[in-house]
Amino acid sequence: MAHGAHESHTALIWKVFGFLSLVTVVEVALGIIKPASLHLTSFLGTSPLNWIFIILTLVKAYGITWYFMHMIDEQKWFRRSVVWTTVFLICYLTVILLVEGDYLHEVLTPYIKWDY
């Protein structure tokens, strides 16, 4: 693309919007339905349903960063440094929250009735 030329990204914006909307609809549907096989079992410290939400949220964050923050047009090393750092920090935060939440659940179980 020549300097100063204008290229319409309308089709790309609609595709990204459609993809992000589809992922959001899947998240909302799973949150409303809450299948017992995904919600009442445990896998790596939390339910598989929570892992699905975490993964879909990371996919949406990656898509937003990639297209709407224009990472697709940046150099490879810069894209990787931004995206990999963000994904690492989100995964780290997720692990910390799951570990601390499990600890609090174990410590407070004798004192609190969990009715949700």
Image (cartoon, rainbow, N blue to C red):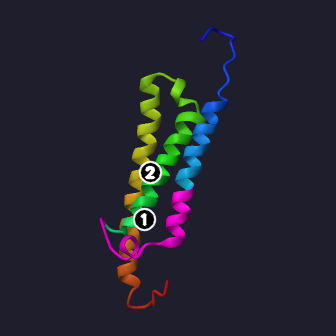
* Residue 64 position in % (x across, y down): 56, 41
Is residue 69 toward the left or the right of residue 56 in the image? right
* Residue 8 position in % (x across, y down): 68, 24
> Real-space Cα distance between discs 1 and 2?
14 Å
So how many labels did they put on this image? 2
Residue 75's place in the image compared with 86, above or below, is: above
Q: Secondary structure at mark 2?
A: helix
Label disc, if present, on residue 5 of the rendered structure: none
**Magenta residues?**
25-44
Amino acid at the residue labelled 1: Asn
* Residue 24 position in % (x across, y down): 56, 55
* Residue 92 position in % (x across, y down): 39, 53
Q: Nearer the viewer, mark 1 or mark 2?
A: 1
Q: Can residue 22 be found in the magenta stretch?
A: no
Residue 102's place in the image compared with 81, above or below, is: below
Label disc, if present, on residue 90 of the rendered structure: 2
Q: Can residue 31 be found in the magenta stretch?
A: yes
Amino acid at the residue labelled 2: Ile
Give the residue at mark 1.
50
Residue sitting at 58 percent across and 30 percent down?
70
- Residue, far top: 2
Question: Quarter of the image holding residue 77?
Answer: top left
Crowdedness near tag 1: few (<14), some (14–19) or many (≥20) residues, C-alpha within 10 Å: some
Quarter of the image where the N terminus is located = top right
Pointer 1 or 2: first along the chain: 1
Residue sitting at 42 percent across and 54 percent down?
55
Q: Nearer the viewer, residue 35 or 100?
A: 35
Residue sitting at 54 percent across and 24 percent down?
73
Q: Secondary structure at mark 1?
A: helix
Crowdedness near tag 2: few (<14), some (14–19) or many (≥20) residues, C-alpha within 10 Å: some
- Residue, far left: 44
